[in-house]
Image (cartoon, rainbow, N blue to C red):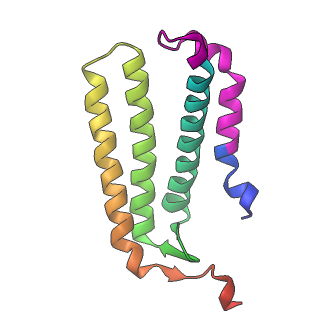
Amino acid sequence: MGFWTYYSPLGLGIVLTLLLHDTIRAHAPAMPVWAEWPFVVAVALGVGLLCQLMLIGAQGAFAQALPVPVGRSIRGRGAAVAGCLIIATVVLASVAGLLLSGELRTAAPVVGLLGLISAAGAVITYVWCWPTAVRDFDKRLR
């Protein structure tokens, strides 16, 4: 998988969100006119990041391989658990944001807390499995 293929969810999430800039500005909270475009860009970066995290979670859950710096990757059950927790984090964070925008002030923090718990679980699993990561993408080996 090349650079452009791997990071395409980030770019596509940003571009598609920027294409919807009128809708985002219409539903944005009250703010000065100068702050509207920075708000839209921040939302676009957030959506792009969520799309990229969803790809990494799917890679861990279904391909059972998560990238680790310096050409290594976490393989097997640890990658699958971390990937499922990353997917749960993205879904729960998105649901919490939608609930918050729908003025459901009680449900949004509960779902957001569940998202934070799954994010903490993903980070703990990733750090726990890091020492056992296999060296497989290192260019020095070829």
Farthest bottom residue in view: 141
In magenta segment, residue 91: no
Q: Residue at x 65, y 46 (%)?
A: 9
Q: Quadrant of residue 51?
A: top right
Q: Residue at x 47, y 73 (%)?
A: 74
Q: Is residue 81 left or right of residue 139?
A: left
Which of the two residues, 121 or 25, is positioned nearer the viewer here? Answer: 25
Work out which quarter of the rendered image holds the C terminus and state it: bottom right
Instruction: Look at the picture and state if 54 lies above or below 30.
Output: below
Q: Is residue 65 left or right of residue 7?
A: left
Please count the marks in the image: 0
Q: Position of residue 54 (x, y in %)?
A: 53, 47
Q: Is residue 120 left or right of residue 138?
A: left
Q: Position of residue 69 (x, y in %)?
A: 53, 72
Q: Quadrant of residue 14?
A: top right
Instruction: Look at the picture and state if 25 lies above or below 41.
Output: above
Q: Is residue 114 left or right of residue 73?
A: left
What range of the chain is rendered magenta? 11-35
Q: Residue at x 43, y 51 (%)?
A: 86
Which of the two residues, 141 or 40, is positioned nearer the viewer here? Answer: 40
Q: Position of residue 129 (x, y in %)?
A: 38, 73
Work out which quarter of the rendered image holds the N terminus and state it: bottom right
In magenta segment, residue 28: yes
Q: Position of residue 102 (x, y in %)?
A: 40, 14
The prevailing secondary structure element of the residues shown in magenta is helix
